[in-house]
Structure formats: structure tokens, C-alpha cells
């Protein structure tokens, strides 16, 4: 263990709770309310979600985690004999231990190739072309799932999401968005929440509040009537309907109200911009230009060990590559101190 | 809607968060920590659970809800071709929408009869006697699940749990305890937490913090090595491993530390004692003597409507029967005011 | 082991293959044909099923077993959060090891009481009355399943099935019929196949050929468009779509053509009539008047042991009760010889 | 439809039943027998399987289809949070509609690349290296599944299977073999059945009788005690335990006795040898040298249309490629006539 004060760059999951969100929880702790979402706070949340995402029929379902949000949403969009097409690096494919297949009753995920960790219409079309449609031997493609930002920090534009949505619709697939870091994407793109979701043909998405300042909640947002009918039952059976849901809903209310979610994400993105600019000055090799709050750099194994000794907290990806992630809590001072430590680590005496 | 100020007696789920627990969350919101339970608060919680339940190998798994705690625990205790024996009024059987069969891969629940909403050795033995053991036609009994207090407020003594545990063990079944209101039972029984669980042969139980003051967490506590190995994977796949688990763990730490959980439950039980004593004075017919924080009274349909008009909040059970539940937030004033309203409703001018 | 020649009364499952069915298989073993049901024999079978059951849209899905036919049909009729109401003695509830919950993704079965092992409208109505409809806590009743004949040999009349179907429809449930011994019921009732199924409001049923002379096939027959769309996929995923399906289809063709199935069942029923008449002459206590090909008699444990010694093959039900089942292979001589042995066993010297 | 007599080269699934197997069924249709495998024929089959595969503890489980054999075997070898590594062209991955994920409770299949449609140690090792072992985010590799012959007709040697088995064992995975055409592989390799299975480290395999002359049965053969304990229950719940199992067992007895399975496969392989030799004489481009009973040739789309007009029955794979499969029923005359038609189709006047 280093004696120096550590700087947190492992994951935005490691951050704490945004003070505005904690204050909202405290303020909500008065009186009593019906359990399981039949409370006025949850009703307010629904109204706000409809406003922010510009869809009068949108429903919001608070759940505990992004894995819950993704896998349960997908189980309501895909029959058990269906398949979900996603990028081979997608979190749902690689990092959720088969949650989607479990909740989906044996639905399978099909990982496609694609540059920059993104799905592209060519690969999706190729998957369509090699499918035996309406043939019971073959899991039937039913959902296209995009992750934005991807787990490697790259971002789809609204136009790219729209193009994938139109292609999906051409064969009857619905479009799912894993928005675990959606706010970071919106800030980076400078577009509205509706432009990346409702207007781009997304049917159901994960809101992704946890990594960006919430205490104990993520949420499914759905514009899809058929999925909505199922989700109330699917979530209950999954133990994902909190009895004191109002304390989740109030977090999400505070998160979405007055653009707090965007301000929190902006801080994370700005910290990343400063960090990557500084690293470039230090001639560090970045694997790609960071678009949101995540970067990958190749520094070699000896430098990685010196960075650990310097008290920088980050993930090692193997092959001398490290991952830095900033969060809403990352300050300018954190960035400057991190850069000083990187400089020392790269230029050992 | 009544214009009088309502008195909350619907469910302990309707209560808010205990101030001590909220304060603990606030205090924990400093610095950063590894996600998914690899943090020091969760480690402390494990130590405290081992101390409180007097079992050096106990593990604790924070989850979102009681349904999650029950169904995931049972899925780790029962093979897909197994059956879980429980009372026909058990929450897992009646109120969890098949969660246990879903997570259990098709495991079935078998509801048994029994006086006072409790399992008795005779009925369990009868279920054993009518089982085709080791016959693939018949779901094999694998777990005995008791609920204490039951959903109708009755309580098993440690001796009763022990007797059921011994009977279960005689045929290779493990013992599960749905402890959604465990603290209320412990206070009513005047026994230690270990006496009702570890010492009574319980292998895995639900801790039940939500109804008794927590904000967003329940937990599975397990003394069973085989279940422990499975639960880490089963919970992740169920989206029940919170990334910021430390904020669940700190709630449970505060809950169990210094007997807070027992003090909160004591308040609920005392309020119920005062309420039932008062109702008896008013000649209200109680279906049974309340043992914890729940009572059922038969007052007839007209009186029920007048009680609603009086602003009393409670559940109607059909047939002119109502349910009152007190919580850690129910004050002596609430009880006295409730009694005044009952008196008025029963003696209309 | 007795040295006398045994007489088979254990189960109609113990019988062999009807010669007409074996001959049909042999005749079909010419040339080649497309696999998985895309053959002309299967097409002919579909036509015949539509004619016999008087439904122009009926579909037939050959499967390996009655368990497969029941559980897969029910999985296509019930959402994962639904429940299937059946008699507590139903084969699907007691003898299929949770197959329906497994294929149904966690759907649950709810066993109801009812005289003569049959469902009655009163109990079904009571189940409806205690259901929390449209409440996610409660598995939603979605299918009513009747077994005719029941596993205890009792029979529903077409009017009784119709009444249950109408009651089911009043709450949006569909009607399933477990017809494992349907031909025996039709012969006993003297009604047409359509009167007990199509005309009585049945949506999907199991045909039950195996116990009545087929070699290796049972079948799902469905009048329900929604289930039909699902079954092709559900069966493939269950490994229940035989590649050489034509050899199953030809068994079913022979079975249904020219009333063979009814003639085979008639033999079994007549043998049972003769057996029960003879037993009554011998003052054997029958638990009920056998309606089809199954009877239960209480003879006491010592007599049971002497019957075993006499080489009678039957099932012991506990409590000195035995079960006799006749099949299409049971001859008049078998019955007379069985009666002689019963007489000897009951009057030991 | 061509008026010429068609020649069947679509699939060995299109063939009929071997006369020896049909004769065995007829001979077995005497007397009665206990259902569900508790009969003497099934006991004999077990003895024969132990002898043929040289394993004194082997168990054999007749099922309806190869999909059932593969998916149920895998479900008994892999926990729900596990993954099954296979080639990306494997039948279990591409052609079974997610059966393995369904029976496996959400277990996932991971398709690996590999030359000649075969797994090679390098790719398996790479999959191991990129796995987060003992990390709940990541489905844990638990089974390695090889298909021999592959769906593209290529064959693993016993040494190759052994090497994969050893590599699998090094990380605690078990080895599964999809033997849908195992007999064709054994004939091509000239090795014993034990050399490709027991001696090569295979734990459980599919026997694959249907494509090679059986009427209505495939089978799981297992050398794995843990899987054996589960399979009895898993098969019953899947409706894969035939009540008249003796008529499946007797097919498998005839199949394995006196090397019938190898003689049937030898005919198919010899027919393929003659066919491929003739095609090479005609300068047809073969995608690979056929090793068993399957070949792929690129003839171009116009020639494909002429082949169809000539009454040749085969599968089109897209891109002007066709697949020919021979079976135990393919005669020398069939081959010579097929070659004459190919010659005409390739040299139109």
C-alpha cells in the first residue's frame, strides 16, 4: 500500500453519492407512503421522465443495478427463443454473467464485431443475412442492443443510433440502449436526451444513474407498451420492486431535475479532457481519443507498477494497458496531482 | 379522502427510514471505495453478522428486497427438480409471483396446512410420507422454509424451529427462515438472534431490514458453504449486487450495531400491545392475540367504512376483517388517536 | 418372484405396441423424406386431426411423452408470471417433477381441492375470488387444466368441461386438457372427440397415444393461434422435434384413422368392466365405480401380499389399497384368470 | 418438381430406418414391461454400452433427439452461471435455438474460432486467458464441447480430443462430445469407440443413432457420476423419459450390437468416397476433402439450378455452394446416377 493519498481513477462506480441526491433522500424521509411504487414521488418521477425524454407514454421502473436494468428490459423485449444482437465487447455480453439468458428463459446473445467497439450497419446486416428466419433451429434475432458510451468509452451519434434502429426495424427487431453512462454521452454529444433515445428509435433503455451520483438505484425507461405490461411482473419476480421505492424515485427525480445529471457528467467529462490533454503533453500513448469519461493508455508494465506505487487507482487491462475513469467527484486538483504522478512514474530517476 | 390527518397502520413497509440509519449513510459518503462489495464497510458488516449470529463462517449478501432475499437464497438451497415445503400462507408461496420457481429453474413450492399459519411437524411428516423419494416423477423435497413472524403475525419459538430443523435434516432437507420481520419476533420471544437461527438449525435466512427502518436494503445471511459458493454468482446474475454496496452495508451495520434493530422493533411491538389492549377495551373482536406488530380484527363492513372515513389507514382482508400493522414510527399518540377513532367508528350516533 | 405367469395390471404404460401401429411404421419405411415434420405423412396427420376434432385450424405437434405434451403446451399458454389452476391430484402437479414450472420459466401450478379428483366450478370460483388480479405480487391465473380421465379414473362429461371452460373464459384463462387416456374417456362417455374438446372450449390438449398402443409418440393438439406460433420454437428448444418425425406421425395417423384409438380403448374399458363386475361378486371393496380402465380396491395388506404371490402385477397405493389398470392388450382370459387369483388370495386356506 | 426419380443427398436425417433396427423393434413387441426404463432391455443396453465404450460405470439415457441429448447433457455439466466453450460453427451454438441456455438455466455458449471448423488448443487457451476466473461478472467456463464429425464434415483425431480434454481439465472444465455422426467418425478414423471417448477424456457424449438408422431415438452416454445423478431428474422434467423406453433401448441395442452402427456408417462413408472421387474426375471444386459422409462443393448458381432440375436433392449453402450428405441407404447406383446428373448439369448443351 502506498502511503500517499490515493487518487481514484478505477471506476465511476467507486464514487460516492452526489450531495444533491443525498439531500433529496433526507427531505423525502417524512410521513408514510404506500409501498412498491404506489406513492406520489414515483408518480412525479414518471411525469419528469416523460418530459425529459419527450414521450407521453414513457414508463420508468427503478431497479437496483445496471445489470438488472439491462437484463430485465431485454427479457421483456425478446422471446425465449430469440436472440439479442450486440457488440462482442458489450457489457451485457461480457460482464453480466448470463443475466440476460437467465431472465430471458434461454434467450441468447450474439456478439458481433465492429470498429471502435460499436455496432455498424454492415455487421448487423451480415448477421441478418446469415439468419435462418422463421426456422425453429435458429434463435430468432429480436432485439438490437447498443451501449452508449461503450465499455471502451466510444460514443454513438444520434444519427448512428437512428440508422441502427431503422435497420433493426426492417426485420422486426426492437432497439435497446444500455445507457449505463448515458449522461456522459449526452454531454459529449451536446444533444438532448430525446435525440439519443425517443427520436432515434430506442424502445427501452437503462438510465444509468448509479455511476453518476445516485446512491442505490438505476432504472429502466420504456416507450414500449408490450414491454411495459410485462415489466411490472418481471421486476416483482426478480425482487427488483423495492418496497420503499419512493427513496429510489426521489434520487432519480433529483438526478433528472434541472439537469443535475448533465452537470455531474460534465464534471466527469471535463476532468477526463484535462487528464487526457495532460497525458498527451507527457507523450503518453492513448489507444483512442477519449470521448466521455474513460481513457485507455499503453504505458508498459514497469510504468504501471510505478503508477501503483504513486497511489494512482486504476484498472490494468493486460499488455501494459491501463484504464482511467473520471467521475463527478474528480476535481481539477485530482487531475493535476494525477498528472504529476504520471510524470514521475514515466521519468524515474 | 378524509380531511383528518391519517394514521398509518397499513404496513411497516409504508414507514420511512430510521434516523440512525440515514445518519450512517451520510457519514459513509466520503472518499471512494471499490464496487460490488469489495469495500471495508461490507467487510465490517460481515464481522458484525458473525458476532450477532454467533457463527464464524456466516456470510451476508445485501440485496434490494425481501423477495430477492428469499427467492435467491432458496434457489441456492434447492435443485431445479426439488421442492420447497412451506405453509400455504407463506409469503414466498402467495406473494412473490413465482420468484422462487423462476430463480430456482422450475423448483416448486408445496404449501402445507397448519394451525396458526405455522408449520407443524405432523404436516411436514405427512408430506414426507406421501413423497416418492428418489423417484424422478416427483419433485424432491429439499428445503423447509419457515416464516417468522408469519404473514399473520404469529411466531415460532426457537424450540419449534429446532424441531422442524431436526425433522428436515432427518430427510436431508435444509432449513430456510423468511425473517422479513425477524426483529419483531426476537423482541416478542425475548431470545437472542442466534437462538432463533444458528442454534435452531437454520441454514440460510432473510434478515428483513426494510420493514424495520432501512432505506433500500435487505440481506441474505447464510451459514451454508454450498449456498455461499453459489450466491455470489446467482446474485450477480439477478442484478442484486449493487455497485455501491457500501451504502447498503452501512445501513445494515447501523441496523445491527448496539441493538438498534431490536429497539426499533420493540417500539413497533409496544405500539401494537397498546393498540390491541385498547381495542379489547372497546370490545373489538381480535382474530388472535397479536404476538408482534400485526393484528387482525373483525369489525364488519359498515365499521370498516367509518374507519376509512376517520382517516385510519389499514388493509381490508375481506369478510369485514381488517389488518393493523405498527412500525418503529408508530407513536403512543398515534395509538391513542387511533383508538379514539375506532371508538367513534364503532359507536356512530 | 412368483413362478406363475404374471398378469399385467400395473399400468397401460406397460403394454406393448398395437399391431396396426407397428404395421403402419413398417409400411412407412420406404424412400426418404424431409426431416423435422416437413414430410407428407405429417401433413396427412394434420388433415386427419382437423377432421376428427372438427377444427379447420387445428395443429398437431408429435412429441415423445405425455409430460412433454402437457408441460410444453402449458408453457405456450401461460406467461412466466402466470399460474395454472388444476386439481391437487393432477398428473402435471404431482407426477411431472416440475416440468411445467421449468418450461414455463417459473410459472406456478396451484392445486385445488375437488370431489372425485375433479375440478368443480365452486373451487375454481373460490380461487378466482382469492386472487389479487393485476397485482404483481400474485401469480396471475392464466390456464385451467383438467385431466380426463383423472389419474384416479374418474371422468368429466362434455357439459362439465364446457362449464369449466366458460368459467375460465370469464376471467381470461384458457382451457387445457391432459388427455393421457382421452380415448378411454370418449368410449366411456359415448361422445365424439370434438364434443369433449373443440366444442367444450378446450384450447390445447394432449392426445395421449402412448398408453393406448403407440410405440414412441404422444402429441399436442392446439386450436390456439397464439400457442401455435410459440410451439414450433418451444418444441425445438426442448429437443422434442424428431428429425424422423414421419415415423411418429404415421403412428398417430394409424391411431386416429378408422377409429382404431377408440377400439383399442374399448377393449381396455371392457376388460375393466368385466374385472370390476367380477370383483364385486367376490365382495371386494371398490373405492369408486370404475368409469374407464382403472380401479382402486381396498383389500388390506395381507391380501395384497397374497396377490403379489399369485403373480398379479399391480400398484400398491398404501393403506391396503391397490390399483388395477387394464390396457388394449388385456384379454378376457386375463380378466378371468385374475379373478380366480383374487378369489384364492382373499380366501386363503 | 422434376419428373426424374430424385436422389437423396440432403441429409442423413432424411433416410429411413435400418431393417435390422426395425426387426429388433418387432421382436421386442411381446409381453409387458415396466415403464420409464425399469425394464430388462434397457438393462441390457447399459451392459452393452459399458462394453463398447469400455467403462464399467457408464450410463445411457435414451432421448428423442440430438438436440435433447446435447442440451440436457450440457445442463447437467454446467452451472447456470457457467459457459460452454465450443466452435462458432457448432450445432449446439447455431442450430439448437438456445436449447442449452434454456435447459441450462441461463448458461451461455461461447463460440470460438478455429480452422477446419474445429477447436484448437490455442483458441481455447486464449479464451481461458481472457476469462475473469472466479469473478461473478463473468460466466465461468465449465464445459468444452467438441463436435465430431463437425457440421462441416471434418473430424478430430483421438489425439486431438485428448489434447483438448487435458487442456479443459487444467482449468476444471469437463469435456462433452456431440456425436451426432460419431459412427461416421469412428469408421473414418479406424479407431475404437473407446479411443474417441473414454480414453480421450470425454465425460459425456451424444451417441447420435438417428442419422444412422434408428427410428426414434438418440442417447446420452455419461461417464460422469455427478451428471448421472442429475440426468434422471433433468430428463424426466424435459419429457424425455419415454414410458415405453424399451422400444428405444432395443433400437440402440441392435445399433451397437455386432458393430451394426459401424457397418451402417461405413456404407455412408464409402458412398461419399465414391461420390467425391467421381466429382473430382468431373473437375468439381470441393471446399475440402470429405472425411466422413458430407461434402461441400462450389459449382456456381446456374449449375445448382440445373442440378435441382436433374432431381438431385441437396442443400444450398449460399454463394453457389452445395452440400451433399450420404447415408446408410445411399447405394452405389445412387452415386453413379448422381455423378451422371452432375456431369450433365455441368456441361449443358
Image (spheres, coloured by chain):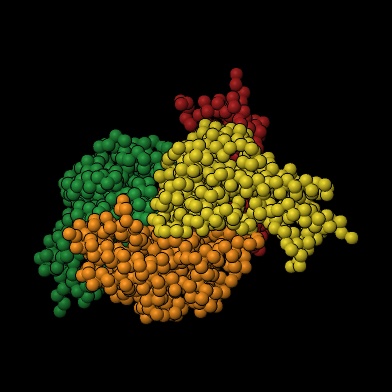
Chain colours: A orange, B yellow, C red, D green
Residue extending farthest right: B349
C268 displayed left or right of D183: right
Above or below, C276 against D105 in this view is above
Q: Is residue B41 visible?
A: yes
Relative image position of residue B214 (x, y in whole percent):
56, 54
Q: Residue at x 45, y 55 (%)?
A: B245
Q: Nearer the viewer, residue C22 or D178?
A: D178
With respect to residue B82, does A200 lie above or below? below
Q: Nearer the viewer, residue D59 or C178?
A: D59
Q: Would residue C144 be found to the left or right of residue A303 on screen? A: right
Whole-percent x, y for residue D53 in the image = 26, 40
Q: Is residue B263 above or below residue A64?
A: above
Q: Quadrant of the N terminus of chain B?
A: bottom right
Q: Which residue is pictured at 47% across the width and 65% down the height?
A: A18
Seen in the picture, residue D34 relative to D304 is either above or below; the reply is above
Residue ID at (57%, 35%)? B195
**Where residue C207 appears, x then y in whole percent?**
51, 54
Residue A105: percent from left, percent from top:
44, 58
Residue D262 in view here: no
The residue sitting at 23% across, 61% down in the picture is: A345
Amino acid at each position: 500500500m502506498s502511503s500517499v493519498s490515493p487518487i481514484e481513477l478505477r471506476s465511476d462506480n467507486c464514487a460516492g453519492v452526489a450531495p444533491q441526491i443525498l439531500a433529496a433522500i433526507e427531505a423525502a424521509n417524512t410521513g408514510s407512503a404506500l409501498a412498491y411504487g404506489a406513492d406520489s414521488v414515483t408518480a412525479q418521477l414518471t411525469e419528469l421522465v416523460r418530459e425529459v425524454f419527450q414521450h407521453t407514454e414513457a414508463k420508468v421502473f427503478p431497479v437496483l443495478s445496471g445489470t438488472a436494468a439491462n437484463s430485465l428490459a431485454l427479457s421483456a423485449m425478446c422471446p425465449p427463443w430469440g436472440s439479442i444482437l450486440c457488440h462482442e465487447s458489450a457489457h451485457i455480453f461480457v460482464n453480466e454473467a448470463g443475466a440476460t439468458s437467465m431472465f430471458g428463459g434461454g434467450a441468447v446473445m450474439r456478439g458481433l464485431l465492429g470498429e471502435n467497439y460499436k455496432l455498424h450497419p454492415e455487421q448487423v446486416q451480415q448477421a441478418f443475412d446469415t439468419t435462418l428466419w422463421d426456422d425453429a433451429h435458429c434463435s430468432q434475432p429480436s432485439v438490437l442492443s447498443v451501449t452508449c458510451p461503450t465499455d471502451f468509452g466510444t460514443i454513438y451519434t444520434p444519427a448512428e443510433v437512428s440508422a441502427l434502429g431503422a435497420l433493426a426495424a426492417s426485420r422486426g427487431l426492437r432497439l435497446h440502449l444500455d445507457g449505463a453512462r448515458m449522461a456522459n454521452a449526452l454531454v459529449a454529444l451536446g444533444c438532448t436526451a430525446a435525440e439519443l433515445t425517443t427520436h432515434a428509435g430506442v424502445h427501452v433503455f437503462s438510465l444509468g444513474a448509479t455511476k453518476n451520483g445516485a446512491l442505490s438505484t438505476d432504472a429502466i425507461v420504456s416507450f414500449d407498451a408490450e414491454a411495459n405490461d410485462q415489466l411490472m411482473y418481471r421486476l416483482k419476480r426478480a425482487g427488483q420492486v423495492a418496497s420503499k421505492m419512493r427513496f429510489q424515485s426521489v434520487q432519480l427525480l433529483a438526478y433528472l431535475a434541472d439537469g443535475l445529471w448533465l452537470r455531474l457528467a460534465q464534471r466527469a467529462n471535463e476532468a477526463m479532457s484535462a487528464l487526457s490533454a495532460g497525458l498527451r503533453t507527457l507523450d503518453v500513448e492513448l489507444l483512442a481519443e477519449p470521448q466521455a469519461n474513460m481513457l485507455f493508455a499503453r504505458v508498459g508494465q514497469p510504468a504501471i507498477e510505478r503508477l501503483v506505487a504513486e497511489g494512482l487507482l486504476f484498472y490494468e487491462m493486460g499488455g501494459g494497458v491501463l484504464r482511467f475513469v473520471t467521475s463527478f467527484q474528480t476535481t481539477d486538483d485530482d487531475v493535476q496531482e494525477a498528472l504529476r504522478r504520471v510524470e514521475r512514474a514515466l521519468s524515474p530517476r
